[in-house]
Amino acid sequence: MKLAFAAAAAAALIASAACAPVVQGGPPMDLPPGLQETAQVGSITMSSGWLNAEEDFSETFSEEVREELSRCMHGTAPIDVRIHVERLERASRAEALLTGEGMHTLQGTVEFVDPGRDNLVVGRFPISVATTAGGRLAGLLGDRQMMVSEEFGRSVCDQAFGRNPRDPGPHNATRG
């Protein structure tokens, strides 16, 4: 019995450590103006609490955010990005099929960290986004995680660097 309890306690400790936020936390902090022009995306590290998501969410999210950030961080000074996702809600496929409506939402905190300055946090932004399911067909067949992750990355660019990395159009999974 003691062995089973010890194993359960160890598993709980490991599971909670894996979900520990990678961000330091604190109040929002704008990037220094010079860094907005010289930053280049370095590594991206993501953490989350318990999310109702597909197994590949972390990979999809990181890829989409990197793609968006690489469009607005065109400098040469590598800056690492740490993101803690606090909330993810995806529209129901059944609701989208029946009504053609639904929203995907994602909320998290993004920290920009300078690895050349002993991992000093140089910017922190709370990000909260929502995007439509895209109608009946997109709501039924679309990659919901990719859509909301792309919107999240676009919002990071807008808030941290003051620019939208993409023009609106059919090449975007979201409204652009």
Image (tube, helix red, strand yellow):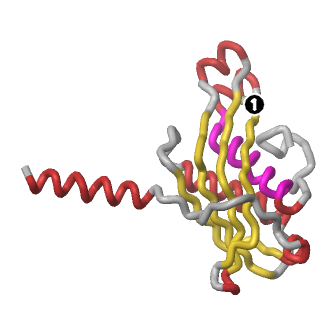
Q: Is residue 98 toward the left or the right of residue 9 in the image?
A: right
Badge 1 is on which residue?
132
In the figure, residue 36 lies in which quadrant?
bottom right
Q: What amino acid type should be assigned to the residue bearing mark 1?
A: Thr
Quarter residue 147 falls in: top right
84 and 166: which one is in front?
84
Principal secondary structure, stretch drawn in magenta = helix
Residue 122 shown left or right of residue 90 in the figure: right
Measured from the top left, where is residue 104 in percent x and y? 68, 34
On the image, the x and y values in percent for residue 40 come to 79, 74
Q: Position of residue 31 (x, y in %)?
A: 82, 68
Mark 1, residues whose alpha carbon is within 10 Å: few (<14), some, or many (≥20)?
A: many
Q: Give the residue drawn at x 73%, y 62%.
A: 124
Image coordinates for residue 102, horizontal then vertical, percent: 70, 24
In the image, residue 38 sits, relative to residue 123, either above or below, namely below
Asked if the stretch drawn in magenta spans residue 149, the answer is: yes
Q: Is residue 164 above or below residue 174?
A: below
| Residue 133 vertical placement versus 38 (above, below) | above
Q: Which quadrant holds residue 7?
A: bottom left
Q: Nearer the viewer, residue 175 or 2?
A: 2
Quick one: which residue is furthest to the front in this view?
27
| The C terminus sits in image quarter | top right
Question: Tag 1, which secondary structure?
Answer: strand
Q: Residue at x 9, y 54 (%)?
A: 2
Q: Is residue 17 magenta?
A: no
**Residue in view at x 31 percent, y 53 percent:** 12
Residue stretch in magenta: 142-159
Name the residue at the left extreme. 1
- Asked if residue 9 lies left or right of residue 65, the reply is left
